[in-house]
Image: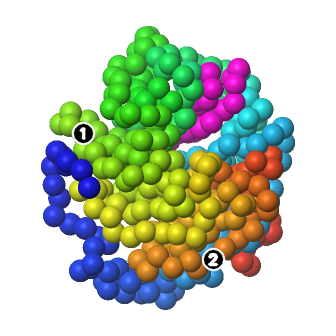
Amino acid sequence: GGLNILGQKSWNVYGQEQRAKVRRDEEEFAASNEDPDAGAVPVGASGPAPRPAGHVGELPTAHHVTLAGHEGPVLAARFSRGGSYALTCGKDRTFRLWNPFRGTLIKTYEGHAHEVRDVACAADNSRLATCGGDKQVFLWDVSTGQKIRRFRGHESAVNAVTFAAEDQVVISAGYDRSVRFFDCRSNSSDPIQSVVEWNDAVTCVVTHGGGCRVTGGGVDGSVKTLDVRAGRIHSDDLGHPVTSLAVSGDGQCLLVGMLDGRMCLLDASDGSVMAEYRGHVSATAKVDARLTLGDGHVVAGSEDGRVVFWELVDARVDVELEAHPGKVACGLDYHPKRHAMVTSATDGTAKVWLPEGVAGTSFD
């Protein structure tokens, strides 16, 4: 709960009244022989043809390739916006660009003085934003590997970064209890806006609502959403440190991961809890969680090395993978166009996962 001062919306696509309709739609889509995205491959890389959501067999549960090269824990793993590339962030102060389907390293980027905690890719794949223990946010040229900009303003380590406003703004979340906005077009290195509304570190940040809403999760247990246009903040207190945030494909729901071994699916319009997911270990470490393509399942890493899939509506555990045995599976991302997943862990590796029967196939 919490005071909601944002404009209200009347719909709730996964509310109780429409759950039956959602299930019917998923079943019809899964049973359909037509795949509108079949055969499409992201520009600049090869990949498996998309597969529909709805059944466990379509989930990326088979190991495809391992992305090895970091010296030490791989703190985050991300797909580029179009899914052509994968990016990994290391405690070794580097981040790396990969072809996720061929498992080949494209480029290693150096320049951080401390660990790299997060990376975001612009839609045109020309720029990257990174953050970490440096207390700064860096903007990079993908091709040259050079820093374009160095944004300052955070007073301690920066945990998360994302692009907004047609990639002209970089948003970051830090240990200094703030979310800060930086203008990529300006010559200034200082933030154009700083939101210091949390009582403890901000661990994650996402944009939604057509880019007009920015949501940050904090160690104080709060999820706060800034309506950029209205200049208002909606706050929900979940009672436990928040470590991950993800937006559903339709933008109507927020998936929130917490350090009590629980995730909640919130209605993005009013913060109401629609479902809870338990079964993974999340007590002391930050582990990522996402919704799968088509929003049919929730997937999260675990401190014991597992990756767990839950059915969205029933919140039952459908699949458990021994992804990184004995290590913390901290990084995770889901492909934006097909059933593919990338995970990373404290074992120093990242792994790409595809559906059974597709994994291990050559995509030359």
Task: Describe residue 219's horizontal placement relative to residue 1 as left or right.
Answer: right
Residue at x 43% of width, y 80% of height: 314
Q: Is residue 118 visible?
A: yes
Q: Which residue is mark 2?
A: 319
Element type at marker 1? strand
Of callouts 2 and 1, the N-terminal one: 1
Q: Quadrant of residue 333?
A: bottom right
Residue position marked by numbered label 1 in the rendering: 233
| Residue occupying the point 74% across, 79% down | 357
User: Which percent across, then down, holds residue 73?
Assistant: 76, 43
Amino acid residing under circle 2: Val
Question: At which x and y percent is residue 335?
Answer: 58, 58
Query: In this rendering, is residue 26 above or below 171?
Result: below
The reply to whether the C-beta atoms of the residues labelled 2 and 1 are less than 8 Å apart is no
Tag shown at residue 46 = none
In the image, is residue 36 above or below residue 108?
below
Q: SS for tag 2?
A: strand
Whether residue 116 is in magenta: the answer is yes
User: Which stretch did the figure color magenta?
Assistant: 112-134
What amino acid is at disc 1?
Ile
Q: Identify the residue at horizontal 28%, vertical 39% (top origin).
A: 226
